[in-house]
Amino acid sequence: MRDVAVISFAQAKNQRRVADLNEVEMLMPVTGQVLDQVGMTIDDIGFTCSGSSDYLAGVGFSFVSTLDGVGPWPPIQESHVEMDGAFALYEAWVKIQLGEIDTALVYCYSKSSPGDLPMVLTRQLDPYTVAPLWPDTVSLAALQARALIDAGRTTEPEMAEVAARSRRSALDNPNAQLAWDRPAGDLLTEDYHVAPLRKHDCAPITDGAAAVVLAAGDAARRRVERPAWIRGIDHRIEPMALGLRDLTVSASTRLAGEKAGVADGPVDVAELHAPFTHQELILREALGLVDHQNVNPSGGALSANPMLAAGLIRIGEVATRISSGEADRGVAHATSGPCLQQNLVCVLEGES
Amino acid sequence: MTAAASTPHSEGAPLAITLPASLQGVELVRSVRTPAQLDYQFTAGAATSRFLRGIAQKKILGERCPVCGKVYVPPRGACPRDGVPTSEQVELPHVGTVTSFCVVNVAFYGSSMELPYTSANILLDGSHLSLMHLIQEIPADQVRIGMRVEAVWVPDDELKPTLESIKWFRPTGEPDDVNVDIPGEDHGTGLGSWVGGVAPIDPRGTH
Ligand SMILES: [Zn+2]
């Protein structure tokens, strides 16, 4: 295995709706910044991989016009996944492992605001028996939360604590969309949104973008003082049919966490991609972080959830804390699909 | 959904699925229709909005890259060579050269065009990106690469912020520009052999 590190990370300020700019205009400052920070241009990049979804844009092949923003002419080596940027990072990491290139640019973006997001996301469900019923994302997450409560593994007050802690942490995150300081007890006096979920249990709808630069070995050491080395990375998927899964556990996260080596050392910081409060609890259990004191210091997806980018942002948030010396070893997680269907776990570490 | 009752799952014994009595002998579902519609609020973006506002005033506004100087129309806000925002607006003439075309003989859903018609890439004078539009006022089989064309606009009181404010392009009658610089050809995209400005087929048949 080659040593590969995250050497730069940038994200747009997360907003409910970016009304005046199209996707490429929203993304360009982010890809510009992520390269500038390490004194690179697209000419220094061996491979570019992006993550976005035409379903969110409502435009076929939308990623092709967005590619203009990185300057792909003369032709560059490039790929795209219709997934979160964390999975694009995985593809780039594999490409670097092959040994032909030493650097990669990973970027991702989405505007969720042009469509009705919970309805748009029904299109990722089984197209024959489930999608025709248009079950929205929040309702499916509510079924999962109900199952977890019925199993005696969480309570509404515990979920409210996750919400309160996340939004309080987000006060220190200048890119957060939702940040406030309210006691969990207050939150419980509010009405249900989709029982047993209240509004505060759900991630906001966000327009945003993020980017990362990966570099191998000396190419990383040459450019930054303290690269955030990827010590393990793995992703796993569960069946599409919701009825085939035990929604109260995340088997795919557990397996990906084992393969990535989460338990092989101390965890100073963890960023978990949990768009709903109860999902953080499921993920903590799957990764052996039940009582961990430093989960989602950025505020997590509950404070800003740009689809297709919130997973890569988790990796970027951990990498930034390692590069700054604030943490030595951290865990980043990204999810995709309904009710935590697919999960990626990445272990990052700094050199002493 | 087709019954898998008789499908062998290996070379050995067939997979045994026993349907409940209520489902035995019922007609198989061979297909399902699940229509879906999603509505979106599309954002043209800053650069394309500037372009569309120009069109409503009967102006064609491209945007120039501050690094390489190329002019893009319609602008999308970025230079694909340099990955930087374009910001300087450039008013372009309504005249250009056909760089590629396609004669459409098959109707498609939503089109009200009379067949056959010609769709073409047109490089406006002073620009470096072809614009796609229709060619009319000439028989489809006479349209050719290098042909000089001009925009035909709707009446002034019908101008709107849409490319449909240009009805189509028509021949100007000028001599063909066989040296037209086809965007992309300088890097060998495999689209043709215009390398060095030599047309793959001389449009006048004298090559
Ligand atoms: Zn340029």
Image (spheres, coloured by chain):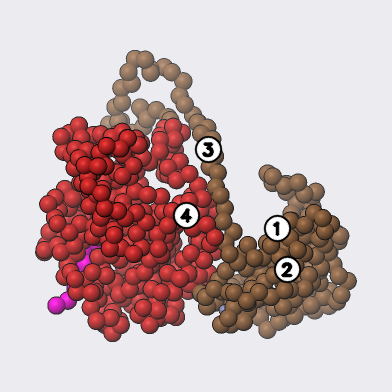
Amino acid on which the number 2 mark rests in the picture: Ile
- The label number, if any, that marks residue B60 in the structure image: 2
Placement of the N terminus of chain B among the 4 image quadrants = top left
- The label number, if any, that marks residue B36 in the structure image: 3
In magenta, the rendered stretch is: A346-352
Secondary structure at badge 2 equals strand
**Residue matched to label 1:** B161
Q: Give residue A288's position: percent from left, percent from top.
A: 13, 52
- The label number, if any, that marks residue A17 in the structure image: 4
Amino acid on which the number 4 mark rests in the picture: Arg
Image mark 2: chain: B
Asked if residue A5 is positioned above or below residue A247 in the image, the reply reads below
Both labels 4 and 2 in a single chain: no
From the viewer's perspective, is B199 left or right of A32? right
From the viewer's perspective, is A349 left or right of A236? left
Q: Give residue B118's position: percent from left, percent from top.
A: 77, 58
